[in-house]
Image (tube, grey):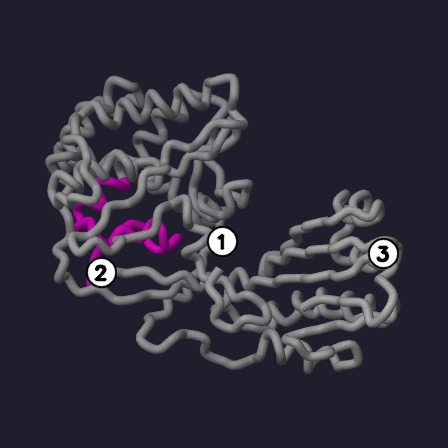
Amino acid sequence: MGVVPAGAELSRATVVALLGEVLGNDPDLHEGVGAGEYAEIDWKTERISTQWLVHPGAVGVTELVVSVWDRHPLRPVAEYRSDVGRVADVLQRLARATGGRFVVEEADATTMPLPRILDLVAADDGDRTPAGVVLDPVFEPDDAFLRRYLAAGDSRLAWLREQGAPGPFDDSRDSLAPLWGWAIRRLRPRTADAPREKVMNEQGATYQRPVGAVLPMWYGRKAALALDFWSDDALAVLDAVAFYAAECVRHAVPELSWQAGREDEWGNMHEGLPVLAGHGRSIQPIAGLTPVARSVYRMLVPHPADPRPAPAPEDLRDWYDAVVADHRGPSLAATIPAILAPIPLRDNGSQASTHPLCALECDRQTHVGQDGDDR
């Protein structure tokens, strides 16, 4: 959707004044657009994310384009319509005030009633679950999920002790190599023919879920962490070891604390997940352990397109050393998180899951004006 001139360019002052009702005191709007500069402005609510592109002209604005994404496309549509309505209302008033045209879905909506506009971009069409997909509608707020994840910490360590994992669990660097040596012997892949179902979570992201499996609480909260290629026992091992390794890092870097992941310059790769944050890039335990576990997977399921060195007990200690060094280092703003290795490929070469860095791409978002467009 957007506003274009019907004759003379849109008044800069009017654009700034009306858009300010939604975008507030954004400096790119008031200083950039007001000075005749091109601007890309992001604005979001709990339900929608938007991007506003303002194209300058000789004396005014030649085009304003707004893209809108539904952040939770499987929730009831009323909240989405309400938030999109705020955007549509200000754009329609801008078109009328400047003598321009408000365009939605290639239709002139300058004089169109707001409910009809909303029907064009957010029809109340009931069930939005695609055929053949199981809906997992349970959504737990980020902070509540973080509290539940941390509350299970002691039970994870107790489980490791019950399973015969070597201690002591004293959050020390030296404890990590013996623990990972034990984990290497326990990690096993899920068989390729094990039954799986395609699931869509309430954010609209789809992933594979083993049928009848006992899965850790974080499985499927992000599609990137739906590690269906590991067995139930392997997932339990990764869950417990990743939490313990993260605790070791937290004790080594006191500036880090457990937080609910927020959207940042890396997109939403960690948004809604438990992370260590507060000093450099955030660390997500399961995503952080992915490149370490990948060597184990490739030892068990070799693939010529993804050769890996043989796993060693010291791998987890080396990961710890790298993460601690990064978060104690002087150039924290430029630190790259140690999670950039891709998740293993299945034997047929298809990706078993999406790389954590691409979580923004694997979470399906609906682009206003392009039904079914995956962004």
Q: CA distance from mark 1 to mark 2?
A: 24 Å
Q: Residue 236: give its label.
A: none
Q: Name the spot of residue 85 as percent of width and height, x first.
A: 69, 70
Which stretch appears magenta? 210-239
Is 15 positioned to the left or the right of 298 in the image? Answer: right
Give the vertical position of 140 relative to 79 (above or below).
above
Q: Name the spot of residue 184 as percent of width and height, x first.
A: 15, 34
- Residue type at numbered disc 2: Pro
Q: Which residue is mark 2?
A: 210
Give the vertical position of 355 relative to 119 (above or below).
above
- Is 334 included in the stretch rendered in magenta? no
Pick the residue in front: 352 or 260: 352
Helix, strand or loop at label 1? It is loop
Of mark 1 and mark 2, the one earlier in the sequence is 1
- Residue type at numbered disc 3: Gly
Give the vertical position of 347 relative to 91 (above or below).
above
Q: Which residue is mark 3?
A: 60
Q: Residue at x 81, y 55 (%)?
A: 57
Label 2 packing within 10 angstroms: few (<14), some (14-19), many (20+): many
Q: Residue at x 84, y 62 (%)?
A: 10
Location of the N terminus by quadrant is bottom right
**Principal secondary structure, stretch drawn in magenta:** loop
Q: Which residue is mark 1?
A: 141
